[in-house]
Amino acid sequence: MSPYEQQRFDFLYEQHLTNLTLQGKCPATIDGYSRAVRRIATHFDRCPDNLYTQELKDYFNALIQSHS
């Protein structure tokens, strides 16, 4: 990720954590959801809000195939 994208990701990630907390999610749920977002960002090496629907479908399909 470029420094700009990393900064954007960090900002959006903090908002994500805040929103989950305000929704009353338990810490384990927040951890699980947040870990998934970080894994997606690492896999694609870019901020998840810049991904296409088809990229996400392919990613999740590959996860299902490899973990089922």
Image (spheres, grey):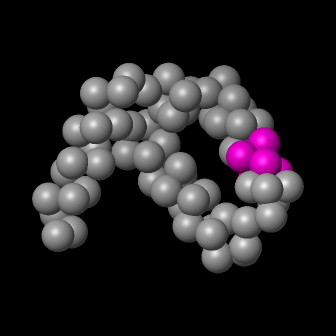
The quarter of the rendered structure image containing the C terminus is bottom left
Q: Is residue 13 magenta?
A: no
Is 2 placed left or right of 21 in the picture?
Answer: left
Q: Nearer the viewer, residue 38 or 31?
A: 31
Question: Which residue is found at the position 49% from the left and 56% from the top?
Answer: 36
Q: Which residues are magenta?
A: 15-19
Is 29 placed left or right of 61 in the picture?
Answer: right
Question: Which residue is found at the position 14% from the left and 59% from the top?
Answer: 65
What predominant SS class does the magenta segment belong to?
helix
Q: Is residue 1 visible?
A: no
Q: Quadrant of residue 64?
A: bottom left
Q: Nearer the viewer, residue 16 or 4?
A: 16
Question: Which residue is found at the position 23% from the left and 39% from the top?
Answer: 58
Q: Is residue 18 visible?
A: yes
Question: Which residue is found at the position 44% from the left and 46% from the top?
Answer: 40
Q: Quadrant of residue 9?
A: top right
Q: Nearer the viewer, residue 11 or 60?
A: 60
Q: Position of residue 2 (x, y in %)?
A: 56, 27
Instruction: Please tell me whether residue 22 is drawn above or below residue 2 in the rendered image.
Output: below
